[in-house]
């Protein structure tokens, strides 16, 4: 984090490391099949781009674009897809955009906090909305902030997405069931953004 409380340095460091590993993969693995390249990307590169994203998830377009550029480069490593549009490569390789992966990660952490899977009090992060609005009973109250530092912090940025989820997602008793439900909820959104 920089002195002005921005995560640009973290984004640049993650991208630098991701590109470094992608370069190593390109130089050392001659097999350009989808199975090999995507297995290497998912196991060696993507963890660096997704590590602790609920803490440092970028909200600036330039940072998101920088991180997405690593996946854009990785999808070009698969033989036969080099000249396709990025959206077509993602659909062919069945990969979600990284911004949608971050949203999914935020929602999973939220259900863990709300269901006390983590050993933290949910009141430290969220307040239940008692306004009697339509939807599920665990709607969260979104605070208003003037500064981006608080506006885009995990406990505030996840509220809108959480409140849009249907009742069947919120009432899931296990995290794995929740993951299955939100995969179907987020899938149309991720491909509509392409």
Image (cartoon, grey):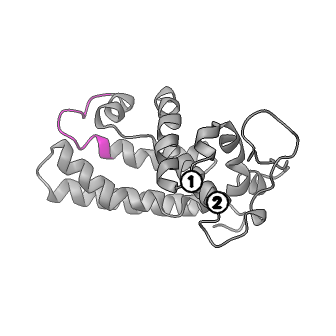
Q: Residues within 10 Å of mark 2 (few under 14, many from 20)?
A: some
Disc marking residue 115: 2
Q: Quadrant of residue 139?
A: top right
Image location of residue 75, percent across then percent down? 30, 41
Q: Nearer the viewer, residue 61 or 49?
A: 49
Of the numbered discs in the image, which one, if any, rests on residue 120?
A: none
Q: Relative to the observer, which residue lies in front, 14 or 57?
A: 57
The dominant secondary structure in magenta is loop
Circles 2 and 1, Cβ within 8 Å, touching? The answer is: yes
In the image, 155: left or right of 128?
Answer: left
* Residue 57, position as x, y percentages in the image: 59, 55
Q: Which residues are magenta?
A: 74-84
Residue 77 falls inside the magenta stretch: yes
Q: CA distance from mark 2 to mark 1?
A: 8 Å
Instruction: Using residue 10 as the reference point, say whether residue 71 is left or right of it.
Output: left
Judging depth in this view, the residue of 181 and 158 nearest the camera is 181
Q: Residue at x 68, y 71 (%)?
A: 120
Residue drawn at x 64%, y 73% as measured from the top left: 119
Front label number (2 vs 1): 1
> Quick check: 73 above or below 45?
above
Comes first in the chain, label 2 or label 1: 2
Residue at disc 2, secondary structure: loop
Residue at x 59%, y 58% (from the top left corner): 109
The quadrant in which the N terminus is found is bottom right
Residue 65 position within the rendered picture, expressed as x and y whole percent measured from the top left: 51, 43
Q: Which residue is mark 1?
A: 173
Residue under the point 81% across and 48% down: 141
Is 82 one of the magenta-colored residues? yes
Which image quadrant is residue 81 in?
top left
């Amino acid at each position: 984090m920089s002195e002005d409380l921005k995560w640009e340095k973290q984004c640049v460091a993650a991208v630098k490391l991701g590109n470094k590993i992608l370069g190593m993969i390109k130089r050392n693995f001659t097999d350009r099949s989808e199975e090999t390249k995507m297995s290497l990307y998912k196991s060696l590169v993507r963890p660096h781009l997704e590590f602790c994203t609920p803490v440092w998830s970028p909200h600036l377009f330039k940072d998101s674009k920088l991180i997405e550029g690593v996946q854009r480069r990785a999808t070009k490593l698969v033989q036969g897809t080099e000249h396709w549009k990025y959206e077509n490569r993602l659909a062919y390789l069945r990969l979600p955009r990284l911004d949608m992966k971050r949203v999914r990660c935020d929602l999973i952490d939220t259900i863990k906090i709300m269901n006390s899977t983590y050993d933290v009090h949910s009141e430290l992060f969220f307040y239940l909305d008692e306004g009697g609005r339509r939807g599920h009973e665990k709607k969260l109250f979104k605070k208003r902030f003037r500064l981006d530092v608080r506006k885009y912090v995990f406990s505030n940025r996840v509220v809108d997405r959480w409140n849009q989820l249907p009742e069947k997602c919120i009432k899931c008793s296990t995290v794995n069931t929740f993951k299955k439900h939100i995969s179907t909820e987020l899938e149309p959104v991720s491909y509509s953004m392409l």
